[in-house]
Image (cartoon, rainbow, N blue to C red):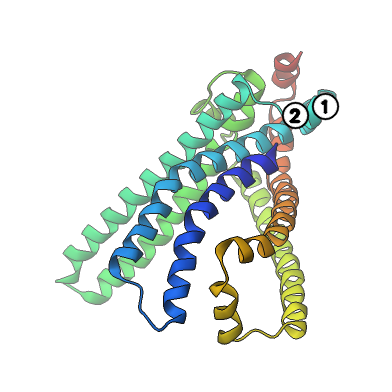
Amino acid sequence: MLLVLTAVPMAMFMGAFLPAFAEMMSQAASGAEPSAEDMFALQARMMALNPLMTLCSLAVRTLLMCAIFRAVLTPEDSRFYYLRFGKTELLVGAVYLCLIILMAIVAVVGVLLLVAIGAVLWFASKGLAIGIGILGALALLVAIVWAMLRLWMALPMTFTERRFRFFEAWTLTRGQSGSLFLIGLLLIAIVFLMELLIGGVIGALVLAFLMGHPLNEQSITAFFQQPVSQWSAQLAPLAMVAGVVFALVGAAFYTVVTAPWAAAYRMLVPAALSEALS
């Protein structure tokens, strides 16, 4: 299911993007510069598909999140490998979207306020304006992280109670900011190590491929000068393998960064959780 939700919009995106890209490559091979109209048309196609990609990304994240919540909070409910799509997923998805929108609004308003303050102070003292800007940016970052830590428990709370919960998480996490911050720091360290490992493996594979198949401008141009059907057919197996690997790695990655929050919620409300899930 996750692979389908990821692969279908990506295939639509590539289907709309590749023909125009191939045409531009052919023009470049013949020495002609792509026109502004061609560039604008390509950009318009990409922008038109952005909403679909965003919705599919939100759906995938919500499905994974709820599946992980089930595995941690209700491990006995393992039907369909914990993957479902129903009212609970819609509610959790709505909370997740509200969190993103709220943090984006806070960030934009904070940046605009800092810019306004900096512009006023600039005429009095450039050094003071820069200093206040740096301190203000750090304070804004701390405020956003603190708010996210306090409100993030709205996701498992909504999942367990099967009702839209948002600011109720603020009460639940009162006095727990330090512990939640330590969880966040630990997850950042784990994610950093995972990215180093995955990046190293991908880099080694790419290096091995390049050593066996040296690439240059002529070979790349010749490849894309073939009809689209030919070179896309050659790339299709690689794209399928990459899609499967991406889905598996993405699921593992999301499990690592989501499961600890479900476990933290279980420790915060053991009695209420037992009643909600009974």
Q: Nearer the viewer, residue 115 or 39?
A: 39
Q: Which residue is mark 2?
A: 70
Q: Nearer the viewer, residue 87 or 232?
A: 232
Asked if residue 78 shows in the view, the reply is: yes
State the SS at label 1.
loop
Report whether 59 appears left or right of 2. Answer: left
Q: How many marks?
A: 2
Q: What separation in Å lies between label 2 and label 1 (alpha carbons)?
A: 8 Å
Q: Residue furthest right?
A: 76
Q: Residue at 60% across / 86% down in the picture?
A: 216
Circle 2 Cα neighbour tier, 10 Å, few/some/many (<14 / 14–19 / ≥20): many
Ranked by sequence position, the earlier of labels 2 and 1 is 2
Q: Residue at 65% across / 57% down in the picture?
A: 188
Circle 1 Cα neighbour tier, 10 Å, few/some/many (<14 / 14–19 / ≥20): few
Q: Nearer the viewer, residue 98 or 230?
A: 230
Q: Residue at 61% across / 83% down in the picture?
A: 219
The C terminus lies in which quarter of the figure?
top right
Percent of width and height locating residue 138: 43, 61
Indicate whether 222 appears above or below 263. Answer: below
Percent of width and height locating residue 246: 70, 54
Report whether 35 appears left or right of 68. Answer: left
Q: Amino acid at mark 1?
A: Ser
